[in-house]
């Protein structure tokens, strides 16, 4: 292709992008969603949001126009996405995960409604001053897991529990928060938490092995890094007969013995419900931040046997799902 | 005055590759003398030069410049005393920088560098006049990158750089060897002029016996790390290359086989 | 593209422009491939954010971030110059070590900076739209730093530093302590990057341990893109080209975010960005000229 033809096409492309629509119809309310990275849990949050909105009458392409951008793990891009979204003048922005939420909060400067999701500790992240009445333009749903209930299940299935091993990524903000909260909750129960650092998913296997002989069971929080390498811990658990427990129910399908948790899809639907309220005119500042509501007990009978523990009858009856 | 006292240089001492490059070399060069140094490959010429320049530290022995001991001084520390023109025109200049920037670097040699401007207007004028003398038209191209110059032009500039601030000793390291005969002759003419004008103490290493006799006022020949010949004054004046050869063979009892040495 | 997105691209582009100047100093001036920046950017951010939250005035905290970055650079250069470790490896070692240091400084992987005073706060109360304040103030900061770096490179020490990178052996023969100058240069380079990190934390709403990933790539892309667009012959233009390249890169990201109507999806963002960078290089018709010309006196 001739040089000048290429140049001409280049100019047209750039002009199109610079001046072009970037966003659709004026009547449909714009709902902008972003996440720091694409990831099964975060993806199901998004699906939950869209499904809930559709269920409430806000269909994508009809009453609302949904746009999604992923920051591909890059904090700089997260910032530019936040700026683009704010500049588009949408009805609401839905950031999923803490770094995306912080970038959107910084760009919005109090002017655009923001409903975050999958942020473990929104107060520590300085998104809201308190849960009850956030007051400004930001509210959302936290994925803080019910650590209390989870520890109770672990103790029930491992009655001799004294030391609990927790592999985690010290570089993930949510994980560090959860580890500390776990220690607070465990102490009055007489359980000692022993953390094992895994800065990347490659390190998870080694972290798991380092806990063998030191702990009576392993526990995995909603740490993205560790959850992505769960199979490694299942292997350790089966080899060393060290039971593995998790905080989200999808992990039980993959091999954790039990989890009192939630499905990220349900968090998505909870978030979608709040978004619908904002679209109907409520101010985000008046809507309290919500925690996880729908909790389920999932059990995995097969791995329980492989890891050498018995499933108590009454628990099996309570469980929403038992994997054989 | 340069005083080399019983210098030994051993490379890779204690291994199979040990080389005794310079073996007990002593040499005194009075101020203003122009010494030419010849010798076959491996005779120790480059090593001697590197010891004087500070790029090689001698195993034993002392080096005094104007009664100050500089034996273990690194190159950068003795740069105020020693100036060097390399054989490779690329090695002695910064290709990336401009002509005037290279000259400015030479201007500050041996001085403390601070935050004042690297090149003032009046300094530029001074540099321009020094370049004009060369007759190569470089004074009109002072902002051109050094890399644009030919080998001969670069050596000429290197020579100017070496003599901008007069050094205690000027080291010429086969500085015309990489040039064609015509350019080499031009550079040698320039060298003679500059050395004479500024009365510089000079040590020139050359591979050519012809060149060694035609320039300077003293010639030494190195062989196996030692001075085997040292002629000056009257004895040297009437010498021809064949005479030099005979003297060498007499001292060493061997025939000189190095073609470059004979034919150069 | 909305005005906010445009100004936002300028803003982030200016901040990474500082990084590009730092990378220019190490890569181009000193010929020292320096990956430390992947660690010194978050270090500057961590120090700056932690100090601001502790009540230290934002300007002081930002400068402290720069100082911290400079120290990191000094470590790398020291490993290379004094211990003889290959420069690339030395920088990788420092970068790896900084991951732990940064976590220690913040005490956690993320330090939010929402709702606190930043270096931009005093200007926000002047009544201008906040979306203009940050880029304008940042422009002032970057311009001042650019001029300072240019002034330094024109001094005797600056010329000595350039000689160190151009021909170290010749530089030593001219009496230059190449070891000291390398340490000074790499410290300066990372000091700029550290300061950029501190500013970034204040713009983005927080310091995060993952901020540094890929910084060297973005910095290099900015330097090379700038050179392709502007073909600098003089140092000050070369420095401006670094900032320009950074801004152009960020504008292409902003444009790529608008490519939804082409049928492209979120995952295609980085591909689209790369294509647009090629477009940006083709447009001024300078790409061929750049490949042939090496006219810059660096």
Image (cartoon, coloured by chain):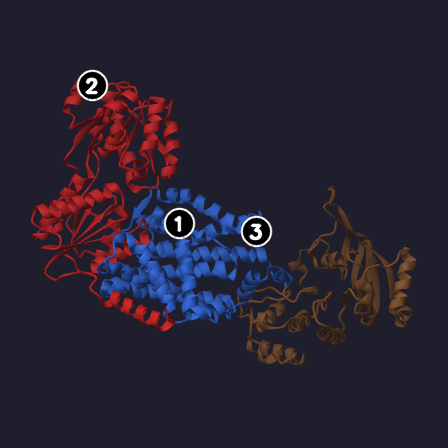
Chain colours: A red, B brown, C blue
The answer to whether tags 1 and 3 share a subunit is yes
* Callout in the foreground (2, 3): 2
Q: Residue at x 27, y 64 (%)?
A: C6
Q: Residues within 10 Å of mark 3 (few under 14, many from 20)?
A: some
Q: On residue C43, which mark appears?
A: 1
Mark 3 lies on residue? C81
Q: Chain of mark 2?
A: A
Q: Can you see residue A133?
A: no
Which is nearer the eye, B195 or A198? A198
Give the label on residue A312, or none: 2
Sequence-earlier tag: 1 or 3 = 1
Does the residue at mark 1 contact the one at mark 2 (Cβ under 8 Å)? no
Quadrant of the image containing the N terminus of chain A: bottom left
Position of residue C160 measured from the top left corner of the image (x, y, whole percent): 56, 64
Say whether marks 2 and 3 touch (CB < 8 Å): no
Measured in 3D between alpha carbons, the distance from the residue under mark 1 to the one under mark 2, in whole angstroms, is 50 Å
* Residue placed most toward the observer, A206 or A158: A206
Helix, strand or loop at label 1? It is helix
Q: Position of residue B261 (x, y in %)?
A: 81, 63
Label of residue C168 in the image: none
Q: On what subunit does the disc labeled 1 rest? A: C
Residue A132 horizontal/vertical position (percent): 14, 43
The secondary element bearing badge 2 is classed as: loop
- The image quadrant where one finds the C terminus of chain A is top left
Secondary structure beneath dot 3 equals helix
Q: Is residue C208 above or below residue A293?
A: below
Residue for point 28% across, 40% down: A174
3D distance between C-alphas at marks 2 and 3: 65 Å
- Label 2 crowd (10 A; few <14 / some 14-19 / many >=20): few
Q: Residue A93 in the image: x percent, y percent? A: 18, 53
């Amino acid at each position: 292709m001739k040089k000048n033809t290429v140049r001409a096409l280049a100019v047209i492309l750039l002009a199109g992008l610079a001046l072009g629509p970037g966003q659709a119809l004026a009547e449909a309310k714009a709902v902008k969603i972003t996440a720091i990275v694409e990831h099964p849990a975060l993806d199901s949050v998004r699906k939950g949001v869209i499904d809930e909105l559709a269920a409430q009458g806000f269909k994508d392409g009809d009453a609302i126009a949904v746009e999604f951008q992923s920051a591909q793990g890059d904090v700089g891009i997260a910032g530019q996405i936040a700026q683009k979204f704010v500049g588009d003048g949408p009805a609401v922005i839905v950031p999923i995960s803490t770094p995306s939420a912080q970038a959107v909060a910084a760009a919005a400067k109090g002017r655009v409604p923001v409903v975050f999701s999958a942020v473990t500790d929104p107060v520590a992240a300085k998104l809201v001053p308190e849960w009850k009445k956030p007051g400004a333009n930001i509210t959302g749903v936290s994925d803080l897991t019910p650590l209390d209930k989870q520890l109770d299940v672990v103790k029930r299935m491992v009655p001799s529990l004294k030391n609990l091993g927790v592999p985690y990524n010290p570089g993930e903000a949510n994980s560090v928060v959860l580890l500390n909260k776990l220690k607070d909750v465990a102490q009055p129960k007489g359980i000692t938490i022993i953390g094992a650092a895994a800065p990347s998913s490659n390190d998870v296997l080694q972290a798991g092995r380092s806990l063998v002989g030191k702990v009576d069971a392993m526990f995995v929080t909603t740490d993205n890094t560790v959850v992505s390498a769960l199979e490694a811990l299942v292997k350790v658990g089966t080899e060393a007969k060290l039971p593995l427990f998790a905080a989200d129910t999808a992990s039980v399908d993959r091999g954790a013995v039990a989890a009192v948790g939630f499905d990220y899809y349900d968090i998505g639907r909870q978030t979608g419900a709040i978004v619908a309220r904002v679209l109907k005119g409520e101010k985000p500042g008046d809507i309290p931040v919500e925690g996880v509501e729908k909790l389920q007990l999932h059990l995995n009978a097969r791995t329980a046997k492989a890891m050498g523990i018995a499933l108590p009858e009454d628990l099996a009856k309570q469980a929403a799902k038992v994997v054989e | 005055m340069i005083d080399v006292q019983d210098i030994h240089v051993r490379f890779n001492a204690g291994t199979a590759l040990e080389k005794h490059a310079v073996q007990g070399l002593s040499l005194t060069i009075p101020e203003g003398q122009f010494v030419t140094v010849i010798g076959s490959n491996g005779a120790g010429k480059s090593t001697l030069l590197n010891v004087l320049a500070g790029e090689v530290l001698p195993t034993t022995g002392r080096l005094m410049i104007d009664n100050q001991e500089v034996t273990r001084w690194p190159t950068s520390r003795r740069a105020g005393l020693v100036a060097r023109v390399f054989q490779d025109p690329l090695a002695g200049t910064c290709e990336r920088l401009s002509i005037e920037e290279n000259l400015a670097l030479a201007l500050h040699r041996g001085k403390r560098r601070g935050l004042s401007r690297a090149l003032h207007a009046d300094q530029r004028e001074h540099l321009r006049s020094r370049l004009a003398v060369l007759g190569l038209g470089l004074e009109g191209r002072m902002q051109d990158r050094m890399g644009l110059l030919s080998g001969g032009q670069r050596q000429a500039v290197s020579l100017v750089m070496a003599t901008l601030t007069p050094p205690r000793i000027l080291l010429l390291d086969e500085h015309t060897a990489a040039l064609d005969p015509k350019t080499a002759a031009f550079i040698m003419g320039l060298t003679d002029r500059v050395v004479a004008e500024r009365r510089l103490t000079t040590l020139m290493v050359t591979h050519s016996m012809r060149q060694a006799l035609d320039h300077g006022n003293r010639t030494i020949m190195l062989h196996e790390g030692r001075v085997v010949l040292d002629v000056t004054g009257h004895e040297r004046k009437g010498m021809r290359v064949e005479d030099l050869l005979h003297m060498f063979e007499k001292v060493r009892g061997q025939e000189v086989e190095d073609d470059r040495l004979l034919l150069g | 593209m909305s005005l906010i997105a445009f100004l936002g691209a300028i803003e982030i582009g200016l901040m990474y422009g500082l990084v590009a100047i730092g990378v220019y100093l190490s890569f181009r001036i000193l010929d020292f491939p320096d990956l430390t920046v992947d660690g010194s950017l978050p270090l500057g951010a961590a120090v700056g954010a932690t100090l601001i939250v502790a009540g230290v005035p934002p300007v002081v905290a930002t400068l402290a971030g720069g100082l911290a970055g400079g120290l990191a650079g000094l470590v790398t250069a020291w490993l290379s110059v004094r211990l003889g470790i290959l420069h690339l490896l030395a920088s990788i070692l420092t970068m790896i070590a900084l991951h732990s240091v940064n976590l220690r400084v913040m005490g956690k992987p993320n330090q939010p900076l929402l709702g606190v005073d930043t270096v931009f706060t005093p200007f926000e109360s002047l009544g201008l739209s906040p979306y203009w304040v940050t880029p304008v103030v940042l422009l002032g900061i970057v311009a001042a730093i650019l001029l300072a770096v240019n002034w330094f490179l024109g001094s005797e020490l600056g010329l000595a530093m350039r000689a160190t990178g151009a021909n170290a052996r010749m530089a030593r023969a001219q009496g230059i302590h190449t070891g000291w100058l390398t340490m000074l240069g790499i410290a300066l380079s990372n000091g700029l990057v550290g300061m950029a990190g501190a500013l970034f934390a204040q713009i983005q709403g927080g310091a995060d341990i993952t901020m540094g990933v890929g910084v060297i790539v973005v910095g290099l892309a900015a330097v090379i893109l700038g050179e392709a667009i502007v073909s600098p012959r003089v140092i000050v233009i070369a420095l401006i080209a670094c900032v320009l390249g950074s801004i152009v890169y960020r504008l292409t990201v902003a444009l790529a975010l608008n490519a939804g109507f082409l049928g492209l999806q979120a995952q295609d963002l980085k591909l689209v960005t790369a294509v647009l960078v090629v477009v940006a290089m083709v447009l001024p018709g300078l790409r061929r000229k750049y490949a042939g010309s090496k006219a810059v006196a660096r």
